[in-house]
Image: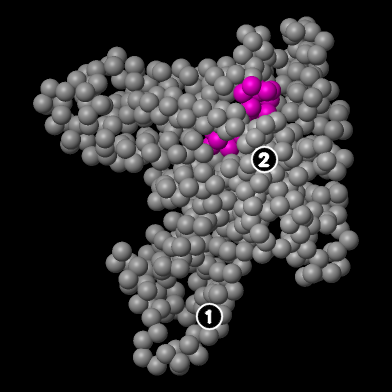
Amino acid sequence: MQSKSVTKYILLLPALLVLAATTIYPFFSALILSFRYWRMNKSPVPGKFVGFDNYLRAFSDPNFWNSMVVTLRFTLISVLLTILLALVMAIFLRQNNRANYFFRTLLILPFAMAPVLKGYTWKFMLNDFYGIYDFIIDHLLPFAADINWLGDPFWAQFWLAMTEVWGWAPYIALVFIGALSVIPQETLDAAEIDGCNNWQKIRHVMIPQIMPVILIMTLLKTIYSLKMFDAVVSLTGGGPGRATETLNYFVYKTGFRFFDMGYASALAWILVFIFFIFAMLYERTLMREGR
Amino acid sequence: MSQVNAMSTAYRPAPGMVSWIMKNASTLFGKSIGYCLLTFIIFLPIFWVGTTAFKNSVDAYSLNVFFKPTLDNFIDIFSEPGSFFPLLKNSIIVASSTVLVTIPLALLCAYGFSRFHILGEKTLLIWVLSTQFIPPVVIVIPFYTFFRSIRMLDSLTGLVIINLSFSLPFAIWLLKGFVDGLPRATEEAAVIDGCNLFQLLRHVVLPLSMPGIITAAVFTFIQSWNEFLFALILTNTKATTMTIGLIGAATGQEGVQWEILSAAGFVVMVPMFVLAYSIREYFVQGLTMGSEK
């Protein structure tokens, strides 16, 4: 089958051309735009080239730095909690019995829910007057009764991260269960004979064994957290103030509310740069550990 | 299945049930609490939206779990003015068109990568994988200005085109992994029998790849259906989808009407639960493309 040298490229061509048009073209088009001045509400075509002005403007813009801090903080919290909760769920559901099969099936549901709907759902449940979460928390922790969850900068960030954790932890737990299931039973038995209790078994056998998978999922989740946008719109709208304004949301506002396309493109490219670092790490880890 | 049986015997309270329960009481207790907590955490948001969709406007603002269910909210969202029907139609058209364009292109590409020696294969594959790391907001800016200049804003076609940016790399990787696992013997036999490449793909590869194709199709459908950012920026009135409709439901004149929003949310989420359930066996392969074998 090696002889059909032209045919095999024809198989690849349509998909790769479409992919180039939908990813490489906008990628570089945005790069060029980021060096131009363009207020889209004033002029239908891009204006003059301004060099690095848009980038310099970003670095002296307090709102940009705010969105950087928000993004990094959100990413850190949501990734840590997601991985931790996923590990707990995976270890809890690792054994193959009928109950666990049933619960594992439930784990696929949060992932299939539209992220924008997750945001609205949480907003509803956190409402001060008729929200179920607010009701439960107020009864379990009476001192928290006065907190207006989404009106407080700290808690708004926390709950934004929690919607993300809820959506992702169950899915990542399934990945971890898959990884745990290939640990040989003999390894676990040996640990038991050596006098390990359950906790030590988890701590010294299971977690080190699935470390490569944990690492890969942490990086993958970081990339998806940096992308997160939908729930910001539906849960907090970036507020209160700018407390939950992630870089994604800041780009969106700059470009599509204020129509400052040149500046938005420059901000978007700073985001690309951050992604690039994590993407490199991800692919390095994948090449080393995954195969 | 044998694994299931082996495991369930480990839990069977054989002779002396009482003493067995006594001995394992703390474990059983811990397990039950764990299951309850898990169900509660995962299910509560789904349950709450699911039930609120059937509440009337008074019950929606109470914490009642027992109430008289009503279909009024669904009648409301599908009747004029502001019917969700066109939005639902748009969502279905966009998601199915994205699937119909993605799958054939991705299958051909995956087959090519899997079966032939390609010049620069590794570089190309890494490129395909890397495209998922481009933030969507970077992709949408040039597409917005481009669609604006050719008057294609607010069109379903435009939405399908931009959806390909995430559906194609994903489907290529998923299908490549699948085709890699197919035995080559059948294909070689078909070639000896005189099949050309087209016949080979049509009569051998396609039927064998069906489980992979279905998985990729369901994933693509769910992702396009749930897609929000592109639709928010590129559509306005004619081509808006269900996810954008949620904003409309959430910003009514008298503040948010949660029972209406929940009914719309119900229509958005339940079909996707059914689809996700249908591919539960393959679910994990889904978004970890490239990271597992």
Q: Is residue A50 left or right of residue B131?
A: right
Q: Eyeballing the image, is A115 above or below B170?
A: below
At x 54%, y 19%, the residue is B157
- Under mark 1, the amino acid is Thr
Badge 1: few (under 14), some or many (20 or more) residues near its Cα, within 10 Å?
few
User: Which percent across, then down, holds residue B186?
Assistant: 18, 35
At x 19%, y 31%, the residue is B187
Residue A134, quarter of picture: bottom right
Q: Secondary structure at mark 2?
A: helix
Q: Nearer the viewer, mark 2 or mark 1?
A: 2
Q: Which residues are magenta?
A: B223-242
Residue furthest out toward the left: B193
Q: Eyeballing the image, is A133 above or below A191?
A: above
Q: Which residue is mark 2?
A: B76
Q: Is residue A155 visible?
A: no
Q: Which residue is mark 1?
A: B27
User: Looking at the picture, do discs 2 and 1 lie on one chain?
Assistant: yes
The image shows a total of numbered marks equal to: 2
User: Which percent across, then down, holds residue B23?
Assistant: 49, 89
Mark 2 or 1, nearer chain start? 1
Q: Is residue A89 left or right of residue A192?
A: right
- Under mark 2, the amino acid is Asp
> Of B59 and A19, which appears nearest the observer?
B59
